[in-house]
Every structure is written in C-alpha cells, then in structure tokens.
Amino acid sequence: MAIAIGEIVDGVVTGIAQFGAFVELPGGSTGLVHISEISDSYVENIHDYLKKGDKVRVKILSIDASGKKIGLSIRQAQPGASAQKPRGGRGPGRPKTPQSFEDKLQRFMKDSEDRLGDLKKSMQDRRGGRGSHHPKGMRSY
C-alpha cells in the first residue's frame, strides 16, 4: 500500500528510542515519530506515552527521496490537531483552554511585572536595601 504525505494511517509501535518511536505502517514500511510529535504537551519520557506493540494513528509528515525515511506525527493525527508545533508546551498552571490575544497579553504583562518586581527586590537585597551608596557618593554594582 502506497502512502502519501498528509495521509493519516494506523500503525504499530515496533521500537522506542530516546528521541522517538518507530512505527510500522501498512505495507510494511517503518517511520519515525519524533519525541516532539508524540503529544501537544511536553514529553520527558516516551515510555509514559507509548510502548512496543501499541496501535497508533499517525500522520505522514515527510518521505525522503529514497522512500526509506518517513517522518510521522501522532499529535497531528488527532482530531482538530494543528500542523504547527507547540511552543513550550503546557506546564502546570497553564490554562488548557484557548485564550484570546488580549488574555494572553494581559497574562504576559502580569508575569513581566512580577518578574521585574522580583528582580528589583533581589538587587536591593544585594545592595543592602535602599539608599546604600558607595563612600564617594557613587553606587557600587
């Protein structure tokens, strides 16, 4: 069975490496799901998501000229998945629902102000508090 870029097919995990999982596709060819294409969230340990023999649905991302290297994605094969790679993943405390630009901007501004406040406090603590000056009237850094 011939496969084409963009197709979504079912396969079986035949091996797992630190950088991804090998999946046997219909027709006997094998492709690689890179660790970044396993889930929308950060994957630290592939074994938390996959094991040898698992049946998985994958999207064909690339096929090299020889047809031997096939790039696959599990996360892009999910219903409603975006083709764009997530930036940074979702950490604890990050909202799981889509946000408007204004919401994201507001969160960014609050986080930035909090970090700036922490930085200023840290600098004051290192200098011994407010008003700490060099003997000649110059600040010491």
Image (spheres, rainbow, N blue to C red):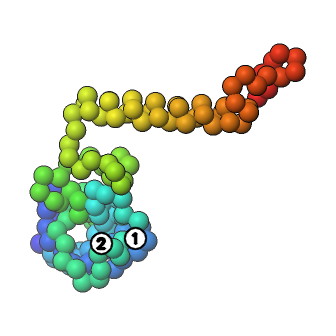
Residue 25 percent coordinates (x, y) = 19, 74
Which residue is more in the foreground, 122 or 39?
A: 122
- The residue labelled by disc 2 is 49
Residue at 28% across, 61% down: 39
Can residue 76 be spotted in the picture?
yes
Residue at 42% across, 36% down: 111
Can residue 62 be spotted in the picture?
no
Taking the view exactly as shown, the residue that stands out farthest to the bottom is: 53
Residue 99 percent coordinates (x, y) = 22, 38
The residue under label 2 is which amino acid type? Tyr
Residue at 35% across, 46% down: 87
- The residue labelled by disc 1 is 45
Which residue is more in the foreground, 129 or 107?
A: 129
Image quarter where the C terminus lies is top right
Determine whether the residue tagged by mark 1 lies in a helix, strand or loop. Answer: loop
Q: Marks 1/2: CA distance? A: 8 Å
* Quadrant assignment, res 127: top right
Q: Residues within 10 Å of mark 1 (few under 14, many from 20)?
A: few
The residue under label 1 is which amino acid type? Asn
Looking at the image, residue 19 sits to the left or right of residue 65; the answer is right
Image quarter where the N terminus lies is bottom left
Residue at 43% across, 71% down: 18
